[in-house]
Image (cartoon, rainbow, N blue to C red):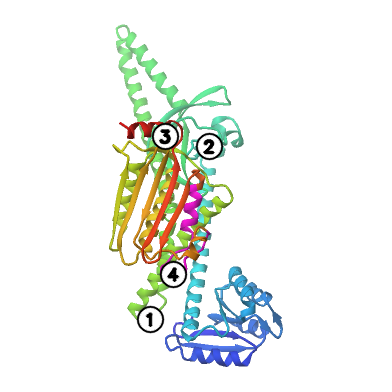
Amino acid sequence: MSSQITNILLIEANKNHVFLLKALMTQAHKLPMSIEHVERLSEGIALLAQGEIDVVILDLSLPDSEGLDTFKQIYAHFPEVPIIILSEIADEEIAAVAVQSGAQDYLVKGQFNGDLLLKTIRYSIERHSLHLSLKQQAKFLQVREQQLHRLIAKNTDGMLIVNDEGLIVFANPAAESLFGCKAGELQEVPLGYPLVVGESTEIEIVYKFRETITVEMRVAEVEWDSQIAYLASLRDISLRKQVEVALKQMNHVLETRVSERTAQLEQANQDLQKMQVRLSQALTQEQELSTFKSRIISRISHEYRTPLTTIALSAEMLSEYRHQWDDSRQLKHFGQIQSMIQRLTALVDDALMINQAESGELELKLEPINLVGFCRELISELQGQIRTPHQLLFSSRNVNSEASIIGKFDAKLLRQIISNLLSNAIKYSPQGGTVKFRLICEVDTAIFQVQDEGIGIPPQDQEKLFEAFYRGSNINEIGGTGLGLAITKKCVEVHNGQIEVESALGVGTTVLVKFPLEGELAVANNTKSSL
């Protein structure tokens, strides 16, 4: 974009609309701009080919093009230029499809003023610029991952990638040589040895499923195919172990001959000392090489675990080119870009989870959980993050000790459920107040209750409360994606639980989540609570 003037290309055949748009844009003193107007799509494409256009305002009904194809022709040739769609009320659905296909926004003719037009132009340029930056960052991360794959594949040491379940998911050619089999035969096979990050251990592996060899194993934590995994580096030390055995045998022979061959012992000891020095030097060199490789792997792992920091730095670089703004304005827009990065990240995470839930791929890893301790720990974490005048109160009923309520849950999904409910209670209580969080244990049921003193939910909104992306009609400027409760409901249902909501406008909202405590855990909880 130009350092002082925003160059706008208006492609519109209706002269009345052209006059109105130019009048609205001329009144926008906060954004100096230059307006180029053409009536035909072909003329617009010709101007775009010359460059220097920062944003396109496009009518879908032109003399030489009609409908969604009008947008597609420009976007196919100039994807780097943000496009705002102008539509009639009857074409609003087509305009929305264009936004899904890559347009930045759309405006319905006769339903916007100068301020809205100005904001739409500004935000479209900023969103499009950030989108291009994110695409470049994703491509960079993909290249880095490919480099890591090549580094591991070409390493002369055996390299295994082991997932968090202890199963081998990748073996390089050197590992194939160590095990005497193809990588495909090793995949999805348990490694069978404890993985201790940062330590060197000696293990014995079976070569070609017959002969046993000794290897030295070093383990580092890495990210592999977007998942936390473990890189096990294997070095064959069988020869070294044989040398160590040979040395012990030689020492024994020398000790038995000490009385008979005193003269030869001195020379033999000298030879032995020289051999030990060489072996020590070899061991030192080997350790230094292993340490060096571990540092390389750790560094690569660190960079993969902090991609969002890199994205934030890229966003900061964008702000350095806005020389026409004063300091306060630059800081304001810089904060908006960082906020968008955080929101996009959260949205991607939520979208992935809701997609997994909708497709039946939401994985459930049940484990016994002390619910009282779990809730208190979560409340403690959340209290430290609150920057608003809210008070969180936690209580439990029918519980004699922290060990009294035990249930089998997926810890990650349970944390998602409680965090979403508490965050909503805080978010939709903009004036502050008390948020009450209760844990109730009945004979065979664990109940979580979250009660706030917030704005409440209108009755007409409550039926659609758990639909993805749906938000209440009274939220005004309160931010959010509309995925929180949808995800919460899916997480509850996968545990065979139920969720209920009671709400009154201006009074607050109460959410009840009920989980069954089945089998031995239900009996144990019932016994403890009756003691």
Q: Amino acid at mark 2?
A: Ile
Closer to the N terminus: mark 2 or mark 4?
A: 2
What whole-number distance in Å separates the C-alpha atoms at marks 4 and 3?
41 Å
Q: Amino acid at mark 3?
A: Ala
Q: Nearer the viewer, mark 3 or mark 2?
A: 3
Q: Quadrant of residue 312?
A: bottom left
Indicate the position of residue 492 as horizontal and vertical percent values.
48, 48
Judge by depth and name the residue closer to the eye, 511 or 152: 511
Q: Quadrant of residue 520?
A: top left
Q: Residues within 10 Å of mark 3 (few under 14, many from 20)?
A: many
Q: Specify whether residue 454 is painted magenta.
A: no
Element carrying mark 1: loop
The disc placed on residue 522 is: 3
The disc placed on residue 325 is: 1
The disc placed on residue 474 is: 4
Closer to the N terminus: mark 4 or mark 1?
A: 1
Indicate the position of residue 255 as horizontal and vertical percent values.
32, 11
> Dot 2 corresponds to which residue?
168
Judge by depth and name the residue closer to the eye, 277 or 426: 426
Give above or below for 492 relative to 70.
above
Give above or below for 81 relative to 37.
above
For the residues bearing labels 2 and 4, Cβ distance under 8 angstroms: no
Q: Residues within 10 Å of mark 2 (few under 14, many from 20)?
A: many
Element carrying mark 2: strand
Closer to the N terminus: mark 1 or mark 2?
A: 2
Q: Nearer the viewer, mark 1 or mark 3?
A: 3
What whole-number distance in Å separates the C-alpha atoms at marks 1 and 3?
64 Å
The residue segment tinted magenta is 467-492
